[in-house]
Amino acid sequence: MNKIVKQSIYLTCIGFVVFASSYLLSYQFFAAQLYDTSLVQLGLYAETLKSKLFELRPLNKILSDHPTIRTALENTHNNDLLNATNKILLKNRNIAVASEVYLLDKDGLTIAASNAGSEGSFVGNNYSYRPYFIQAISGLSGQFYALGTRSNLRGYYFSEPIFKGQEIIGVLVLKVAIDKLENIIKNTDQKLMILDEFGVVFLSNQPEFLYQKTRLLTKDEQENITETRRYNDKQLGNLSMSPLNQFFRSNIVQLFDADGRENYIKASLPIAIIGWDITSLTDEKRAITPSIIIGLVAGLLSIFMYFLLVSIRSRRRLQAEQMEFKNKQAAELERRVEERSAELKQVQDDLVQTAKLAALGQMSAAISHELSQPLTSITNYIENAKLYLSKQEFNKVEQNIGYIAKLSDKMTAIIHHIKIFASKRPTEINRVSINKVIEETVWFMQSRFQRREVRLEISLPDEDVYIWANNVRIEQVVMNLISNALESMQKSTIKILNIELSYNDDLATIIIRDTGEGIDEQSIEAIFKPFYTTKEDEQGMGIGLSISRSIIEEYDGILEAFNRPSGGARFEIKLPISRD
């Protein structure tokens, strides 16, 4: 199986899993949201229905206490009194916009009604079988839903007992037509229905749902409906609705009709006091459609992310390979640089050593002169000591030996400085006193100052100024700059060499000034380049300004050259101070 086929299978599996999981999660979210929203809406519908339904109930209580109505019940054969009662009931019906108001005697016979004299009048009808009469004749306020036996219109009945003392002599009934209540639930895309306590739909925004049973009725329930003539002669049908029992699809029902079957999200809420249930059916597609869209987007996004991750991984692998190759190249280059640096360092050290030896050669006459004087004196003191010894003048012998010792110490110091200068020391870094470096260098070169008749001016701080460096290498830089200054003052009439050391919190600064020829302005930077020289003879430049600058930079310092306004050159060395 090649790589492309494997990736196709991976992509298909990933896309399907992401689509399925996203679809299920989204479906549960949207279905739950629709269910919760339906419950809120049902609560609002229920409150509105109760408000509209019960707003006329107080009228029935008031009329039950009307003296004319009570008198009519006591004189059921007085036609004038009954006609007056009919007019009172009609007037109140018109004012309250009720459906009908009628008066029953204690046997359930209608003796007066708001529709008396009209076709379909309730007068003369007996309603003792109705639950609202049974409730009221028992002394309770009654209420009942049913179809009118005469009008065949849906109505909700409120009944109130009429008392004469402690005796119930009749019942006043107020009928509220509920057909207009359907307007409350019409303007919605949901299927809404209101069920009685037996699960029969008697109010709905779907005409085909009316008088349909939503469940099987027991024998007692069927007999109750027949005896109370709740639905008169209406034949009750069956609403083909069954619940779906799936673990992720709760509250879902299937509704069967002539066009097939559809799935709905069912939400139900009981209407308190009345004993009804209000139910909504929301098309399940409202949860399915956005869930499919989200699932597809998630699936496509997962495939895109897979490609992106594969691309990033491939790029990182390529970058890692390139980095590894670069690291190998860098390591090889670093190795070569280290080798070359070591070679250059060795060459630099060799140049320093050569320069030192060359300087020793140039100063050999002065060194010979320095040593020859004490040697001659020592010879004379030895001869004198022999003479004093022969004369047994021991105190004078001892005095001459003391002179010889002092001269030997002087020669030892001269030879010590020569040995230090000529030795090829290691280049370890130590804490170095710049004061001592300048003093040692000046002492070593004092014979050259005398021979060239150069006046030396030195300005050093009282306390030692320390840096981190190799003292021999710093000495060679200072000596090279002093040697260059001496060379530049060969033709000068005024020969002054000024050496100044100053410092601040961060830097130590060595300034060497001369009264020589100065530096050509165009050559100020060129003098620090390797093999650059302005000398006409074949003499070298000591360790060279190029090597001097590289030594100073090795210790994080700066070496710069300037021309003095009054004539001559000025070299400045700046090095970081050591506070340890």
Image (cartoon, rainbow, N blue to C red):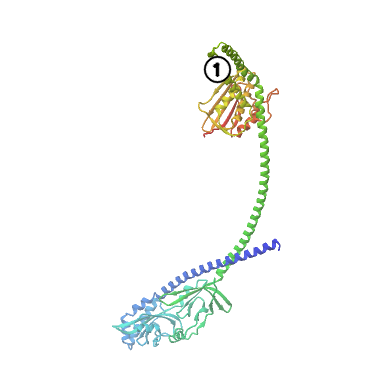
**Considering the numbered disc 1 on the image, is that residue within a helix, a strand or a loop?**
helix
Where is residue 253 drawn, in percent x and y?
A: 53, 75
State whether residue 522 appears in this view: no
The quarter of the picture where residue 417 lies is: top right
Q: Nearer the viewer, residue 426 or 473?
A: 426
Q: Which residue lies at the image location 57% right of the left edge and 32% below the top edge?
A: 575
Question: In the image as oriented, which residue stretches furthest toward the top?
Answer: 391
Question: In the image as oriented, which residue stretches furthest toward the left?
Answer: 165
The quarter of the picture where residue 330 lies is: top right
Q: In this rendering, is residue 464 above or below 304? A: above
Q: Given the image, on which type of amino acid does mark 1 rest?
A: Gly
Q: Nearer the viewer, residue 249 or 93?
A: 249
Where is residue 543 drawn, in percent x and y?
A: 65, 28
Q: Quadrant of the N terminus?
A: bottom right
Where is residue 48 drawn, in percent x and y?
A: 43, 72
Q: Which residue lies at the image location 55% right of the left edge and 27% below the top edge?
A: 436
Q: Which residue is mark 1?
A: 402
Q: In this rendering, is residue 280 above or below 482? A: below
Where is residue 545 drawn, in percent x and y?
A: 64, 29
In the picture, measured across the screen, residue 252 lies left or right of residue 137, that is right
